[in-house]
Amino acid sequence: MTNDVRSGGAPRAARLSGTERREHFLDVTADLVTQKGVESVTMEAVAAAAGVSKGLGYAYFSNRNELLLALLNRELGELQRRSTEEIRAASDFEGRIRASLKVWFDVMAEKGALIGTLLQSQAIQGPLADRRKTYNQEMHGFYGRLAEKEFGIPRPKAVAAAAILLAGMSGIIERWRNGDSRRLLEETYVDVVMGALRSMGAD
């Protein structure tokens, strides 16, 4: 991409479509959050870093909170898309668990700091709670249905089990960051999930 330079200002990005411009704003915001934290994000700061006027940012986002929420939605959407692709390629329940776990580790390695910072941001706690609830319900329902089909566990119990087991993924990421082997954690997690669900299905 070529840039031209405004007199006395930041470099202006080459002409972009509306969709590309919006994505560019989100990319710039992601860089600011990762490097300087959520408090560094203002409409003025993002516009300056993007090399455009402050007013242009308001053509896509009403305020900084909407911008931050849009960024989080994009990152969670990408996580969900990648998980779905990997899960569809798996041939059995264990394979789907492994696929989901692989994507979770990969995304946390790539963008864990960004996603973690956004999830803790006080600026978007209200909308965030709704977004997180929707995301969790979708994941719990998906894996609950799989567990029901695979192990014969009644749907309500299967969904509850899925919620508990998926919550454990955050714990293994923390242990990984503290130095535990990724392979050890992946194998242990799969053993725990499969053992628990087989036991529930045998009741």
Image (spheres, grey):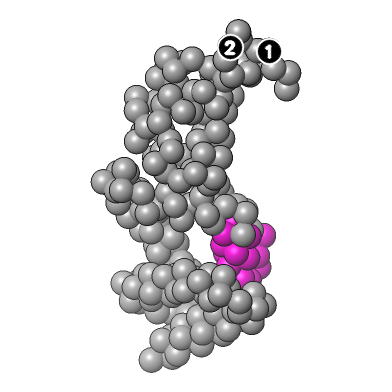
Would you say 125 lies left or right of 196 here?
A: left
| Extreme residue in the top direction | 7
Instruction: Verify whether residue 195 appears in magenta.
Output: no
Asked if residue 96 is positioned above or below residue 21 in the image, the reply reads: below
Question: What mark, if any, has residue 8 been given in the picture?
Answer: 2
Mark 2–mark 1 Cα distance, whole angstroms, equals 12 Å
Instruction: Verify whether residue 90 appears in magenta.
Output: yes
Residue 12: image location, x then y, percent: 61, 16
In-front residue for pair 56/53? 53
Residue 94, can we see it?
no
Helix, strand or loop at label 1? It is strand
Helix, strand or loop at label 2? It is loop
Question: What mark, if any, has residue 189 been given in the picture?
Answer: none
- The residue drawn where x is 41% and y is 26% is 43
Which span of residues is magenta-colored?
A: 89-108
- Reading the image, the residue beneath label 1 is 4
- Which amino acid type corresponds to the residue marked 1 in the rendered image? Asp
Quarter of the N terminus within the rendering: top right
Would you say 119 lies left or right of 129 here?
A: right
- Which amino acid type corresponds to the residue marked 2 in the rendered image? Gly
Residue 144: image location, x then y, percent: 41, 69
